[in-house]
Amino acid sequence: MTAILQDKETNPFESMMSRFDIAAEKLKLDPGLYQILRSPDREITVSIPIMMDNGQLKVFTGYRVQHNIARGPCKGGIRFAPNVSLDEVRALAAWMTWKCAVVNIPFGGAKGGIICDPAHMSMGEKEKLTRRYTAMLIDVLGPERDVPAPDMNTNEQVMAWVMDTYSMHQRHTVTGVVTGKPIELGGSQGRHDATGRGVMICCDQAIKRIGMKREETRVAVQGFGNVGSIGARLLFEAGYRIVGLSDINGGILNDHGIDVHAAIKHYQETRTLESLPGTTPCTNEALLEAQCDILVPAATENQITSQNADKLHCKIICEGANGPTTAAADDILESKRILVIPDILANAGGVTVSYFEWVQDRQGYFWTEAVVNSELERIMVDSFNAVAAYADKHRVNMRIASYMLAIDRVAYTTKLRGIYA
């Protein structure tokens, strides 16, 4: 494959739009609505001047893309990374629109990002960056407008800074402006485990669909961050056999099963999965091709491509990460009869519990973790079944079915509201 074709395949916006186009065609979407839904409502680029610890002034570039507000305020994370691009943020904002619609919660999609290398920044520099970015977007954020959340290289502390900055400008405390906050500042019980728990719930529904049981199901998980490690732990505790795990440096395999609790302890002590007793080391590429029943890509985008899709040996892919599979790989996976639970469904547990947090903040009454987990399971099971029914009715795979369901819901709301002119 030429470099130009590879670049196009791994462009997240191109991947998202190719799936959108297929779903829109199958829905026979009105051309005018097609133009509305494919175009972001607003794209904002800001220059963020920061006085660094060494006394030098440095200017960072930040983005916020608000894709759609037809169903409610925008919702989406803020990421800090050196490779953040407008194309990436634009794609992730659209994904959030479809993700919220798939699980039928009243949000539209947004995403934000700042081009920076947080690994080489002090806490003070990151706080200045966060606060200035928030202040520059103050007119477009808010519980009724746009509600950020943590994403790559951001966390509860960053959300606390966003909330405090926004609140200082409003002259009163506004906990509902962000989600993923510390519990003490209006965060929700169950939020930390939510995305991984959603992955486990989707795996449960998928094995029911193909007639398997937990105890006879082998799972390989790529990625050992929040989603991968928690998803692996919950799957392990539910009785699945975890045969492969990996982090950014590489992976480990054991067909007889890996004790995930021991793996987490080992990782916390050594910051690597390598040398866990009783396991065989492997590369991340080899982990994707491991003999398993469920593969959970929970690392980053573009892990399964046209170059390696035909080498996979799983029956189910449950996409814990956003965009781990390129559009060019979809046909190959379908020809291999691999059931793909797409990202906009599989990892929607996080945004679902973010919605719960927003609701709790706005009503000033907070739920127990048991209530949060119960409500999450209800929504994820209902959403999986709705997508599966759509797939069966329209004779499409689960990915296209989820896009069709999401687009149908957003298009219906848009038509119902009408076009203000």
Image (cartoon, rainbow, N blue to C red):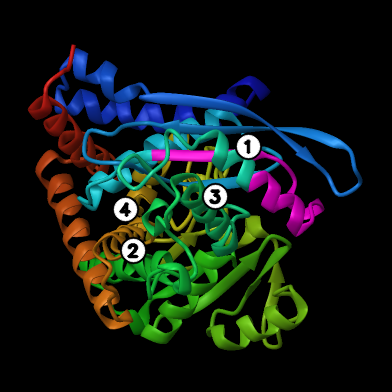
Compute the Cα span from label 4 to label 2: 19 Å
Q: Position of residue 249 (x, y in %)?
A: 73, 62
Circle 4 sits in a helix, a strand or a loop, which is it?
helix
Magenta stretch, residue numbers: 110-130
Q: Compared with residue 50, is residue 9 higher up or lower down, i.e. above or below?
A: above
Compute the Cα span from label 4 to label 1: 24 Å
Q: Which quadrant is the N terminus positioned in?
A: top right
In front of the other: label 3 or label 4?
A: 3
- Looking at the image, residue 403 sits to the left or right of residue 227; the answer is left
Q: Earlier in the sequence, mark 4 or mark 2?
A: 4
Q: Earlier in the sequence, mark 3 or mark 2?
A: 3
Q: Which residue is mark 4?
A: 345
Q: Position of residue 178 (x, y in %)?
A: 43, 54
Tell me the kind of residue under disc 4.
Leu
Compute the Cα span from label 1 to label 3: 23 Å
Q: Let me know if residue 33 appears in the view.
A: yes
Q: Which residue is at a point 17% across and 22% down the rendered structure image?
A: 29
Q: Compared with residue 21, is residue 247 higher up or lower down, i.e. above or below?
A: below
Q: Which residue is mark 2?
A: 357
**Nearest the eye: 390 or 375:** 375
Q: Earlier in the sequence, mark 3 or mark 4?
A: 3
Q: Which residue is mark 3?
A: 165
In the rendered structure, does residue 206 fall within the stretch colored magenta? Answer: no
Q: Which residue is mark 1?
A: 84
Q: Residue furthest right?
A: 54
Tell me the kind of residue under disc 3.
Thr
Q: What is the quadrant of residue 419 in the picture? A: top left
Q: Earlier in the sequence, mark 1 or mark 3?
A: 1
